[in-house]
Image (cartoon, helix red, strand yellow):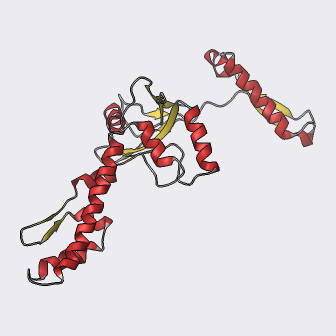
Amino acid sequence: LATTTAMVCGLVDIEFCKLVMGLQSQGSEKFLNSNINLAAGSGNFTTFAPDPPVPISTGLEAPHPETFTSWDKIEISRKTKEMSVEELVNYVEKSFGVTVDRIFLHGDTEDKAIYNALDKKKLEWDITFDENGKATVSDGVFTQWPQVRMAVQMLGRLPPTSGQRIVFKTQVEKVKVSLDQTKDSFMKRFTGDVSTAYREVYRPSEEGEKQDYFDSVFTGRDYVTFGVDCHTESKEDITLPCVKYLFSHKN
């Protein structure tokens, strides 16, 4: 049955066979793009050499790579001992002279990440009480828990004998507990293995088909590809190739 789909699959398989035969070492001219139109008859069938991949600017300067293509990857192999997320962040920063903002599943558009610099910033946040019960709260806390601002203000205004203080102090203490839990969760992931962090973040929470598919792919592969958002000291955004992280599954 001659259909466009069947022909395209056949042509793709031919190019895959060339890869299996190792022809990529002989240059791109061994590979072909094809243009077919079954509606116009068998005469409308052409093959031509593929165009070179389009260079993508990184925004970096030498000695760092100034361009790359969609075929390029930053390959990191940790088959014997896994990297922690912290070590992965440090590796990228030292290798390319950048500051990492996020590390996430390559191609994923959701607001998920195995590392987010905004979460690391929360380690600097703090909530304390002085001997008079007045709360001192880092400014960043108010961006995450804006509702606590009024409670902090009231603790600073109400006299020590006021019975209302317990209500506002309880509100601040609950936020402090949440902040401490956020810090602990971040540090556990930050100091843990990269593959474990990936699984925790991206494995579907609901049992069923999606979770089973994730598990089958995760256990069947020895690598994960990550995207990296980063910038220079001058706050210029940098574009890096995806990171191919290779690891061994734990028994």
Q: On the picture, is 72 further left or further right than 124?
A: right
> Picture quarter containing residue 174?
bottom left
For the view shown, which residue lies furthest in the left direction?
131
The image quarter in which residue 2 lies = top right
Q: Residue at x 85, y 32 (%)?
A: 45
Along the line of sight, which residue is nearer the eye, 222 or 88? 222
Of 68 and 138, nearer the camera is: 138
Task: Judge left or right: residue 126 versus residue 75.
Answer: left
How many callouts does the rendering have?
A: 0
Residue 122 at x, y percent in the picture: 27, 55
At a point 37% along the width and 30% down the height, the residue shown is: 64
| Quarter the N terminus occupies | top right
- Image location of residue 95, percent across then percent down: 34, 31
Q: Is residue 137 visible?
A: yes
20 vs 248: above or below: above
Left or right, 48 with reference to 125: right
Mark yes or no: residue 30 visible. Answer: no
Query: In which quadrant of the rendered view does residue 88 lie?
Result: top left
Residue 61 position in % (x across, y down): 36, 34
State whether residue 16 is above or below residue 174: above
Give percent across and percent down for residue 134.
12, 72
Q: Nearer the viewer, residue 153 or 161?
A: 161
Residue in view at x 85 percent, y 40 percent: 4
124 over 85 or under it: above or below: below
